[in-house]
Amino acid sequence: MMTKSYSACKSFPFRSLTTQTIETSLTQQQPQERSDLLDITPTSNLFASTPTKALILSLVNLRLMSIEPAVKVGSVVMNSPIILSESDSVLKKSVLKIVKNTVYNHFCAGEDLKEVEKTVENLWKEGLKGIIDYGLEDADVSEDCDRNLKEFLKTIDMSSHLPASSVSFGCVKITAICPISLLKRVSDHLRWEYSHPSTGSSSAWKVPSFPVLSDSSPFYHTTSPPPPLTPSEENDLHLAHQRLSTLCQRCSDLNLPLLIDAEYTSVQPAIDHMTYSAMRKFNKMGENVRPIVYGTVQTYMRDSMERMILAADAAEKEDVQIAFKLVRGAYMSRETKLAGSLKEKSPIHSTISETHTFYDACMDIMLQKVSGGRASVVLATHNIQSGKHAATKVEELGIRKDDKRLQFAQLKGMADGFSLGLRNAGFNVSKYLAFGPVQMVLPYLLRRAEENRGVLTSSSFDQHLIRDELKRRLKAIAVLL
């Protein structure tokens, strides 16, 4: 196994500044949070435009998903060979029908564009926007990638037929437009070149980009020098860059920003390399200039803040507006299991408290850059304390709540009370709308069930809000009777 001394790595010239920024962000005195800036009550204001039937269905689904045995059984069933196979058995149809009428309808926007349009229009009536994401995941060969690109383009084009500004972002997974095996190969090269700078770079396929690794990044995936990319692989990588550029250009033509999802550590360096290359082309700096390409920072990663700062500093030097979606992360089980199997320290923070701390610190850094007109950020969080922290920081920095460079986002079916509270406070708020045939989005539903089980079981606050509102409506009816 490769042994690596992090201190022996070649550091970027601004690493000392990066370390200082991290230490300052984690230790600086924070302003007293002002609860009046983000009020999640009364429920009559939060749910004023939500039909009673919708509240009841949400309560039932949230309650179901907060029962741990039910979640475990559901995950096993959805991951079973019968469901994942290509067969069309009666049992499979029955299970998928149950999934469709429960968790699918709760978390997803529909099976086709027509259903998505209805979902977006309903959100728009409630003062919320939609982030549309066609549920395509890992592709194996370039032909699959070409087909997936066509579907992504159709999704982006759909936004032009919806009410103006009702869709805030398009969304894409690089793993759907570049073969997953190739992303792993490219990531291996990027890790090896960073951890062995004396060997130099022989990667003619590399394009101008920003830093994607730091001294604290995990390197245990790559234990020996990776073989050079073959001519066929280099051609496939070139085609992948072209697909991403085509998608970004379509978004630019429609003035619709594009969120690029983060994935697991074995492929993330390659995804960031491609993302930052696209940012250099489509994210211009300037007053009232909206960036097109947003990368994703998973703050449950120990190296997340350092990598974020390195990329942001490099972008600023090139007069590029950095844009990130901040999330906590969705591959905890996978990352911890891989690191454990290699007897390596997990790349994930050891406690949820540490992740919360890093999330809020990354948020502060990005909001500071937003206030200076150097960045844009999507705060994708279900954590109300982080929301209050952000509202306080926004007030302190003098950022307008309706500034398009600042957006909040939550998953459809989760933290709805939080979303509506942010809306009432005057912020731009979107719901993440995964869509596609039920079986195709099963991986997405499994992640919601397995990786976010802690969030689902803590959905008692949402349930509490909905119950209070339903009781209030029943009392109002009783008075009339």
Image (spheres, rainbow, N blue to C red):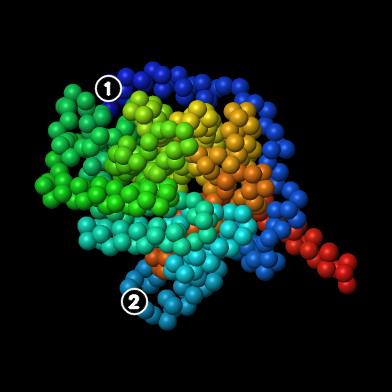
Q: Which mark is residue 10?
A: 1
Give the percent coordinates (x, y) of residue 424: 67, 48
Point out the tag, 2 or 1, that comes first from the N-terminus.
1
Position above or below: 432 against 38: below
On the picture, is 411 further left or further right than 225?
Answer: right
Res. 91 in view: yes
Res. 175 in view: no
Residue in the picture at 63% in, 32% down = 395
Residue in the picture at 36% in, 29% down = 319
Residue in the picture at 16% in, 27% down = 199
Quadrant including the N terminus:
top left
Within-10-Å neighbours for mark 2: few <14, some 14–19, many 20+: few
Which marked residue is nearer to the observer: mark 2 or mark 1? 1
The answer to which quarter of the image holds residue 209 is top left
Q: Which residue is denoted by mark 2 in the rendering?
A: 87
Residue in the picture at 37% in, 79% down = 88
